[in-house]
Image (spheres, grey):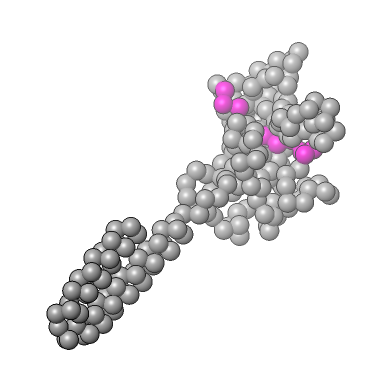
Amino acid sequence: MKRLLLVILMVLVTLVGVVGVSSAADTAIQTVITQLQTIQNEVQALQATSNAGVQVKPKEYYLTSGQFSGDQAIAACSTGFHMASIFEILDTSNLQYVKRSTTVCDSLVDDQGDGLPTKEFGWVRTGYDSTSYMDVVSPELSSVNCNSWTSQSSNAWGTVARLYDNDTAVQLNSEYTLVNSRQCNQSYPVWCVENSDLHRTDLSARR
């Protein structure tokens, strides 16, 4: 833009000189003005396109309304989404909960509103090696994952997570996610988060 203004200033200086030399400058002036207006319109159009750019939106996430066993969890999310790692959804201030317009995103609790349910556990990835052995003493500290979400055995365990409810969050002065372990043959919803690409999928295409 600064460069354009400089060009316009130089043109105006030139026009002043032309006016002092020739009475035919009127035609030249009008031609230059028209050209400047064309340039200005083109610059404004480019700026509008540049400003529009790629809309920066937070990633969307949701908890499935359907329930799945441990070996089904990895493929439970809709097109454009994947089973979430707990570290992808730990800070929900950077995310946006999916607007519920299909059964996949239906409300699971009465007072859910446009946010996520606080009482519902869902399968979640742990970022850990393939394992299904649960720490019986401290199941909430386990990083089990149904052997990388391939097992439906009652002897294998996977990790589920939910947000603390309001009372628990106040008591602990925390908004951290509560995690626990469940047998892989049990059925739970699955936490899903949007893929990192820039392509958004219509909700109607989500199952």
Residue at the spot x=65%, y=39% of the render? 92
Residue at the spot x=82%, y=31% of the render? 170
Expressed as whole percent of the image width and height from the top left, the position of residue 34 reads: 29, 79
**Residue situated in front as seen by the camera: 29 or 105:** 29
Label total for image: 0
Expressed as whole percent of the image width and height from the top left, the position of residue 1 reads: 34, 59
Asked if 150 appears above or below 132 in the picture, the reply is below
Asked if 130 appears above or below 65 in the picture, the reply is above
Query: Which stretch appears magenta?
Result: 118-128
Expressed as whole percent of the image width and height from the top left, the position of residue 81 reads: 56, 45
Residue sitting farthest toward the left: 21
Residue sitting farthest toward the top: 137
Q: Decide if residue 142 is on the left or right side of residue 14.
A: right
**Residue situated in front as seen by the camera: 181 or 193:** 193
Expressed as whole percent of the image width and height from the top left, the position of residue 180 reads: 73, 26
Q: Quadrant of residue 157?
A: top right
Asked if 187 appears above or below 126 in the picture, the reply is below
Residue at the spot x=62%, y=43% of the render? 95
Q: Decide if residue 57 is on the left or right side of residue 3.
A: right
**Magenta: predominant secondary structure element?**
loop
Asked if 183 appears above or below 9 in the picture, the reply is above
Question: Is residue 5 shown in magenta?
Answer: no
**Residue situated in front as seen by the camera: 152 or 93:** 93
Instruction: Tell me, yes or no, if residue 192 can be seen here.
Output: no
